[in-house]
Image (tube, helix red, strand yellow):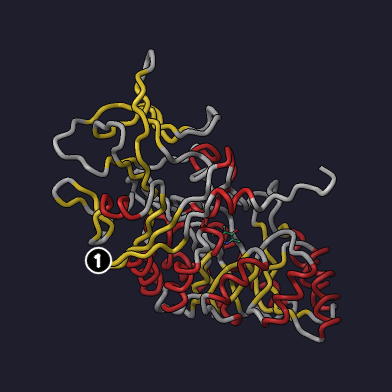
Amino acid sequence: MTPEKFFPYQNDHMFAEQVAISELAQQVATPFYCYSQSAIEASYLDYQTAFAQQDALICYAVKANGNQAVLTTLAKLGSGADVVSVGEIKRALSAGIPAEKIVYSGVAKAEHEMEFALKQGIFQFNVESEPELELLSQVASRLNKEAAIAFRINPDVCAQTHAKISTGKAENKFGVPLSKAHIAYNRAAELPGIKIQGVDVHIGSQLTQLAPFSEAFTRIASLVEQLRQAGHNINVVDIGGGLGIDYQGEDLPSKQAYADIVEQTLGHLDCKIVIEPGRSLLGNAGILVSSVVYVKTGEERQFLMLDAGMNDLLRPSLYDAYHDIQAVNRVDKPLKPYDVVGPVCETGDTFAKTRQVHQSKSGDLIAIMSCGAYGAVMASNYNARLSIAEVMVKDDNFAVIKKRPSYEEMINQDIVPSWL
Ligand SMILES: *Cc1c(COP(=O)(O)O)cnc(C)c1O
């Protein structure tokens, strides 16, 4: 769960670092995302400490949360970036992450995206298929550049996570099957504009056990040895992201335990290790603050109807994800079971069912915890709801790091044809 350390209660009122959430809510209309800069920093430093004995490059997975303030926080600590689109490359560069610390993943990189990445001189393309390799070779040759590549290998292991965030089984769309890896690397060695440098793997997200990592990395290690025997120059292993966080206070492997597995399975290869953590860096560094609009008593249950909806935080509807839900002010309030729902016209717009929350009334503030990753980035304007503000707190300071647009700005994005 979101660390008490960065979102503590003082006298039964929730704070973000040293700023009262109720104070923030007076300044910034609810709903809004609130991130703790210190929590992001602490999480990054945990990774750095865990991997201190290895030649490791931490490439934060920008898709988890691409806000420029978040990226700048990580850039200042020396983080690289794992990106999945040209938009994310531009975000990373503009936050000061140098191109030589950017790795580029994604199953359908378009020609213009490759071209931009090559011109910037990124560290590595994680190539996911042979057609992608052929196009990359053509684009690099045309530009007189060399693309440093790793193939993303699908090791066919079960990540034991939600089906929609499992990526390393044979039936998933990601990567080159282990059995075809040799053909792919041999082809890459023949092609102009391509420099083989590594192997990449990413088996899924929100993994709560180390065994699937261990299994995948062991398979990757023996592949690296075989590829080297076949004459390929492999000196980078990109192990992807995927380490889970404790949404419900469950016991999870530490970053150190994860780093130990990496050392045990891959250490003997003397490769540079690239890590691509997203959720485990940002997830517990953010919350979604919302107000109760109504408390409705149904025939069987009580509903807390919030001003935040599935368009602001999609994870519960998309993945049945669990998020801890807390009343911001708990003074003298008993726990009550509520269905916590949003205003969107979908039954799926439900954050939790029969959840124990401190008794709340209209106007009270509610915090949905562990929303720093895959929260704001998945938001939409469904139901013509404005995208919500994002706020960053550091010690006793706060800043709005993304403004809420006006209704006019939203409407003016549409263009009515002249013939209407
Ligand atoms: C999504 C993704 C990540 C980050 O995953 P987390 O579970 O957020 O750590 C890393 N690498 C790739 C290729 C991804 O698609």
Q: Residue at x 65, y 65 (%)?
A: 105
* 156 or 203, nearer to the observer: 203
Whole-percent x and y of residue 411?
63, 48
Mark 1 surroundings within 10 Å by alpha-carbon count, few (fewer than 14), some (14 through 19), many (20 or more): few
36 shown above or below 158: below
The one nearer the camera, 381 or 79, is: 381
Residue located farthest toward the top when viewing the structure as drawn: 299
Q: Is residue 417 visible?
A: yes
Return the residue at label 1: 396
As drawn, 253 above or below 141 = above
> Please, what is the three-letter code of the amino acid marked with disc 1?
Asp
Horizontal side, residue 226 vs residue 403: left or right:
right
Task: Report ligand 1 position as a quadrant.
Answer: bottom right
Measured as percent of width and height from the top left, residue 81 is found at 55, 71
**x and y percent of residue 402 in the render?**
47, 61
Q: Quadrant of residue 112?
A: bottom right
Residue depicted at x 38% and y 65%: 40
Q: Quadrant of the C terminus?
A: top right
- The residue sitting at the bottom extreme is 144
Q: Indicate if the residue with disc 1 has its beta carbon within 8 Å of ligand 1.
A: no
Secondary structure found at label 1: loop
Taking 96 as reference, is 12 left or right? left
Using the rendered image of the protein, determine whether residue 206 is visible from the camera's viewpoint. Answer: no
**Is 183 left or right of 281, judged from the image as shown?**
right
Dividing the picture into quarters, in which one does residue 231 lie? Answer: bottom right
Residue 125, image x, y percentages: 68, 72
Determine the image quadrant of residue 331: top left
* Above or below: residue 128 compared with residue 247: below
Kindly identify the residue that appears in the image at 46 percent across and 73 percent down.
72
